Image (cartoon, rainbow, N blue to C red):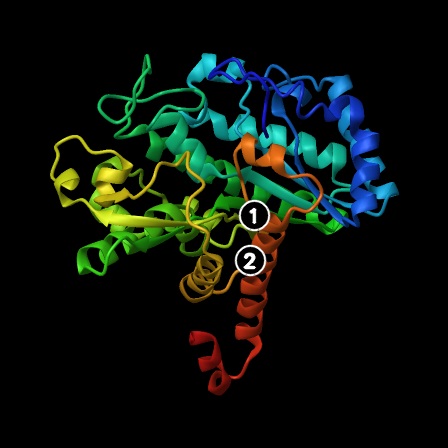
Amino acid sequence: MSVAGYSPGKATADVSADQYHHYKDDVKLMRKMGLDAYRFSIAWPRLIPDGRGEINPKGLEYYNNLIDELIRHGIQPHVTVYHFDLPQSLQDEYNGVLSPRFIDDYTAYAQACFESFGDRVKHWVTLNEPNVETLTGFDSGVLPPRCCSYPFGDNCTAGDSTTEPYLGAHHLLLAHASAVSLYKEKYQATQGGQIGITLLGFWYEPASNSLQDAAAAMRMNDFHIGWFMHPLVYGEYPPVMRSRVGARLPGLTAEQTKKLSGSFDFIGFNHYTVVRTQADERAFNLKQRNYYADAAATIAYSLGDIGEYAPWALGKLLDHLRLTYRNPPLMIHENGLGDTSEISRKIQYDDDDRSKFLQDYLEALYQSIQWVHLPITHRAFFLC
C-alpha cells in the first residue's frame, strides 16, 4: 500500500485504502476483473477496540456488509484474523505478544470472528507473517511496537533484540494453535470452513559458490521458514535453532507440542523474491547475538529493496516445503512486482513488466504442481 506523505509513525491509509466507505465499488471492480476470491484482514481494534470485551457494532456491521457484498458477487472471502494490529490497550497493559496473556485475549477475539462471520467465511488465516512481525517489531524495531536493543536496532526506547523476537514468536505460535483448536472443536463441523496460517516465504540462496555461504543459506531457510513450519508440522523448533539459540529459544511442553503438531488445514505463503546470503561466523562469536547473528548469516541487500527477480525460487520453496514438511496443502497468498512511484507514473495501460513477472511465477507454480503428479521416471525434465 502506498500512502501519500508517508513518514514513520504517522502514516495513515486514508488516501490509498478507504475501503470502509468504498467497499461496494471495490467489490464491483473485483467482479469486473473476474476475481473469485478476496483476501482481507479483520482489524482487531476496529472489531474490539479495547482488545477484549464488547464488540464495536459499527465494526461488526462493516465486516458483515463487506462479506455479504463479496458473496453476492460470487467472490469467496478469505479472512485473516490478526495482521500486525494489536489493540494499543493490550500493548500498554502487558507488552502484547511478549506476554502469555496475549494467547487468551487473541483466542477470545478469534472466537468473536468465528461466531460473527463463520457462517459465510470458509477460509480463515489465524496470523499474517508472524515471522515478520517478530523481527521488525522486536529485533530491528522498524515496525510497532518498535522494540530493539543496540547494536541490532536503533531509535528504540525499550527492548531486547537477543530474546524478544523468539519470545514473541513463541506466543504467536501458541495463540495460533489455540485458535485452531477452538475452531476445529467448536465451529468447523457446522461451519464447514478451513483454517491455516500465512508466513512470509523468502527463499535464501548462497551469495557465492563457497560451502560457507551454502551452509548459511540453509540455516536461514531453517530460521526463516522452519521457525514456524517445524513446530506446526513436528511440534518442535528446528534443531539448528535449538542448538544455536540455546536457552533464549523458549521450550515447548508435551501438551503444547501436541497442540501445535498439525494445527492447520493449509499453509499460506507470501513469496516475492530470493535473498542472497553470506556466511558471517564472526557475528555468531559475539557475546550478544540477535536472530541473524544466531544464524551467522548476512543478506546481500536491504529488506527495503525489491530483491532479485527469480521465479525459480518459488519452485525451490515449494519443493522444500514438500520434501521437508510432509507436503502440506499450500496457498500462495501474496506475490507481485513492487516498483517505485516514478516507474508507476510511466505505466499507462500496458504493464508489460508486471504481466511478465506474474506469468513467469505462475509457470513456476504450474511446473511445481506438475512435478508432484508425474511418475518418478519422468521428473528429471524439471531439473533442467
Residue 226 appears at what percent x and percent y? Answer: 38, 51
Q: Position of residue 379 (x, y in %)?
A: 48, 80
At label 1, the amino acid type is Asn
Q: Earlier in the sequence, mark 1 or mark 2?
A: 1
The crowding category of the residue bearing disc 2, from other C-alpha atoms within 10 Å (few below 14, some 14 to 19, many at least 20), is many
Q: Which type of secondary structure does the marked residue at label 2 adopt?
A: helix
- Label 1: which residue? 335
Q: Which quadrant of the structure image shows residue 109? A: top right
Q: Residue at x 42, y 44 (%)?
A: 307
Q: Residue at x 83, y 43 (%)?
A: 71
Q: CA distance from mark 1 to mark 2?
A: 8 Å
Considering only vertical position in the picture, is 254 above or below 374?
above
Tell me if label 1 and label 2 are in contact, CB under 8 Å: yes
Left or right of residue 120, residue 228 in this image: left
Which residue is farthest right?
72
Q: Which residue is mark 2?
A: 361
Using the image, determine if residue 43 lies above or below residue 370: above
Is 26 on the left-hand or right-hand side of 333? right
Residue ranking furthest to the bottom: 377
In-front residue for pair 138/382: 382
| Residue 172 percent coordinates (x, y) | 46, 35
